[in-house]
Image: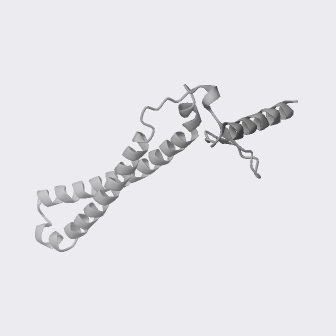
């Protein structure tokens, strides 16, 4: 299965924006709910319009609280997909001869996509990696 993302960070930005707007809306609705259940309750307690406003305030606050969770989960999932699929997306159509590598370093990490200053340095690194790959296969 291959992921192809045209705009790789669009989903994570949307999820983050949804979560932040939901936090702001939850704070505002919590303040309004506090006002409606405080001093305004004594004045308008028997009114059907007041009961409707309180119900809507509580229901929308619960909705926005759930959107915070959904936005956070989608944001984390989108960031995971974006960072884990970077090689598939980034090197799908690239000529293999144009990809350069650096490493392995002390922790056996190979850096892919690193540019070197000279052709000789790049050739040495490529030859070293190729020989190590042959050693690990045999």
Q: How far across and down, in percent of the image, does residue 52 sit?
A: 17, 55
In the picture, which quadrant includes the N terminus?
A: top right
Residue 103 can be seen, yes or no: yes
Front residue of 35/87: it is 87
Q: Is residue 62 above or below residue 86?
A: below
Which residue shows up at 25% across the image and 69% down it? 34
The quadrant where residue 116 appears = top right
In the picture, which quadrant includes the C terminus?
A: top right
Which residue shows up at 76% across the image and 47% down it? 108
Q: Residue furthest right?
A: 138
Image position of 107 (left or right of 14): right
Which residue shows up at 22% across the image and 54% down it? 56
Which residue shows up at 77% across the image and 34% down it? 127
Residue 85 can be seen, yes or no: no
The quadrant where residue 46 appears = bottom left
Q: Is residue 97 above or below residue 56?
A: above
Q: How far across and down, in percent of the image, does residue 135 sit?
A: 86, 34
């Amino acid at each position: 299965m291959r992921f192809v993302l045209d705009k790789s960070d669009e989903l994570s930005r949307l999820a983050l924006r949804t979560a932040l707007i939901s936090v702001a809306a939850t704070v505002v609705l919590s303040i309004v709910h506090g006002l409606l259940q405080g001093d305004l309750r004594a004045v308008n307690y028997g009114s059907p319009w007041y009961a409707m406003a309180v119900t809507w305030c509580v229901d929308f606050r619960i909705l926005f609280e759930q959107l915070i969770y959904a936005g956070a989960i989608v944001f984390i999932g989108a960031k995971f997909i974006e960072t884990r699929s970077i090689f598939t997306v980034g090197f799908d159509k690239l000529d293999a001869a144009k990809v350069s590598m650096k490493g392995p370093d002390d922790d056996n990490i190979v850096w892919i996509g690193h540019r070197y200053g000279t052709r000789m340095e790049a050739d040495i690194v490529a030859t070293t990696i190729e020989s190590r790959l042959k050693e690990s296969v045999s």
